[in-house]
Image (tube, rainbow, N blue to C red):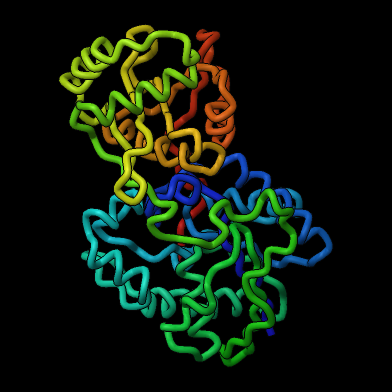
């Protein structure tokens, strides 16, 4: 009998930024790399005969510390990939709720019957996963396999393994990033689940940021903005926090510069809304002194009552999305001075920018998969 440890990948950009990055090869967050180390420690005394991963960067990074420690190759299998989300791919969940209200409501209430154009169903994903795990079980024989996959694929597969209807995916749920399910596969290809979604190796600070809650209370819609009083008030709130209430704020001058920016590129200034309420903005620009493939985020601001709760990351997700589609390869920010700016930057793997003392930089694209990709 083969023992398969089925692991959800570590925290990635899509998790932190609340975007549907199912097939998008997203970056890994600093929290994700810490989760990977805790996973390595969990398996320190468990024999592993084969290591498998989907071809996503976030999955490969999850298992790489264990593979290096054991001297084992990472075998990439496409059957471990995430569900496809069709036309929603790399959209913010908040924008999906606004632009696809019916389909978004359907996803929240019965995701197993997903009808998003171009998306796969949970049953299709479960069938794919079980086919792949049976093949892996034959490869390791009576040994132990460590397999890294994705949340929707795992919970759909667990339902199928336990003979439960796909509607039970909401009951099965998904564990924290790097959570582990132990599955046994006999020689006839029958599955039994010993435990599922176990994240006991993670300390509280490395568990999910959103406590398992989804929906309008956490997902912001971020859109290019029409200039006006709403944006000016947000800019005024930002100025009070950064410069102090005693420093005069010239709203007319600020809006004039904003008009110049949006005339150059309307996507470079966007407002975020939480349950329809404007709560922040992001200001992006190209700097003459930095290389052409760099895009600079001048401001990421959410109202003080939302700071420290993971909302700033959603503005980062918007900026990264826009810059990638403009051909930028590097996102830059000023060295942060305020706690919220520092916290937002530290969530991702920014590093000092060579030749620019006051800038930090982040590569926007993960490296290509270095391993053969097999079915």
Q: Which residue is drawn at 37% across and 54% down?
A: 20
Q: Specify the quadrant of the image occupied by residue 162.
A: bottom right
In the image shown, does 187 or 161 lie closer to the viewer? 161
Q: Which quadrant is home to the N terminus? A: bottom right
In the picture, measured across the screen, residue 6 lies left or right of residue 219, that is: right
Coordinates of residue 71 in the picture (x, y in percent): 73, 52
Residue 114 shown left or right of residue 139 in the figure = left
The image quarter in which residue 176 lies: bottom right
Residue positioned most to the left: 263
**In this picture, is 34 found above or below 255?**
below
Q: Which of 149 and 320 is in front in this view?
A: 320
Identity of the residue drawn at 55% across and 60% down: 53
Residue 182 appears anywhere in the view: yes
**Observer-nearest of 203 and 361:** 203
Task: State the residue lying farthest toward the right.
Answer: 45
Residue found 79% across the figure and 66% down from its top: 46
Quarter of the image where the C terminus is located? bottom left
Instruction: Establish if 58 lies above or below 105.
Output: above
Q: Where is residue 86 in the image (x, y as percent from the top left)?
A: 27, 60
Q: How many labels does the image show?
A: 0
What residue is rendered at 74% in x and 53% in y?
203
- Residue 140 visible in this rendered orientation of the protein: no
Residue 150 at x, y percent in the picture: 50, 63
Residue 52 higher or lower than 328, as above or below? below
- Would residue 257 be found to the left or right of residue 122 on screen? left
């Amino acid at each position: 009998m083969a023992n398969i440890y089925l692991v959800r990948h570590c925290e990635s950009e899509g998790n932190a930024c609340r975007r549907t990055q199912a097939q998008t090869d997203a970056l890994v967050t600093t929290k994700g790399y810490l989760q990977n180390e805790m996973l390595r420690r969990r398996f320190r005394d468990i024999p592993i005969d084969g290591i498998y991963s989907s071809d996503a960067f976030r999955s490969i990074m999850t298992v790489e510390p264990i593979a290096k420690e054991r001297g084992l190759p990472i075998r990439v299998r496409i059957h471990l990939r995430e569900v496809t989300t069709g036309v929603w791919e790399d959209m913010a969940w908040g924008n999906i709720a606004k632009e696809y209200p019916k389909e978004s409501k359907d996803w929240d209430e019965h995701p197993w019957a997903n009808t998003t154009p171009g998306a796969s169903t949970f049953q299709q994903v479960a069938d794919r996963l079980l086919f792949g795990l049976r093949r892996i079980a034959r490869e390791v024989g009576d040994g132990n396999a460590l397999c890294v996959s994705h949340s929707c694929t795992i919970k759909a597969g667990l339902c199928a393994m336990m003979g439960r209807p796909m509607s039970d995916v909401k009951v099965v749920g998904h564990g924290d990033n790097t959570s582990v399910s132990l599955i046994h596969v006999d020689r006839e290809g029958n599955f039994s689940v010993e435990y599922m979604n176990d994240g006991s190796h993670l300390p509280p600070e490395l568990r999910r940021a959103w406590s398992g809650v989804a929906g309008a209370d956490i997902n912001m819609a971020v859109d290019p903005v029409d200039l006006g009083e709403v944006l000016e008030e947000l800019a005024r709130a930002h100025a009070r926090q950064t410069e102090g209430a005693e420093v005069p704020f010239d709203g007319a001058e600020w809006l004039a510069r904003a008009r110049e920016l949006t005339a150059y590129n309307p996507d470079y200034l966007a407002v975020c809304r939480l349950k329809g309420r404007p709560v922040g903005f992001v200001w992006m620009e190209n700097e003459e002194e930095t290389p052409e493939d760099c895009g600079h985020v001048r401001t990421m601001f959410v109202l003080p009552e939302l700071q420290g709760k993971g909302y700033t990351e959603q503005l980062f997700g918007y900026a990264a999305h826009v810059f990638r589609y403009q051909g930028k390869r590097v996102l830059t920010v000023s060295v942060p001075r305020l706690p919220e700016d520092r916290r937002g930057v530290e969530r991702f793997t920014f590093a000092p920018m060579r030749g620019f003392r006051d800038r930090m930089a982040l590569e926007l694209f993960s490296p290509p998969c270095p391993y053969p990709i097999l079915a």
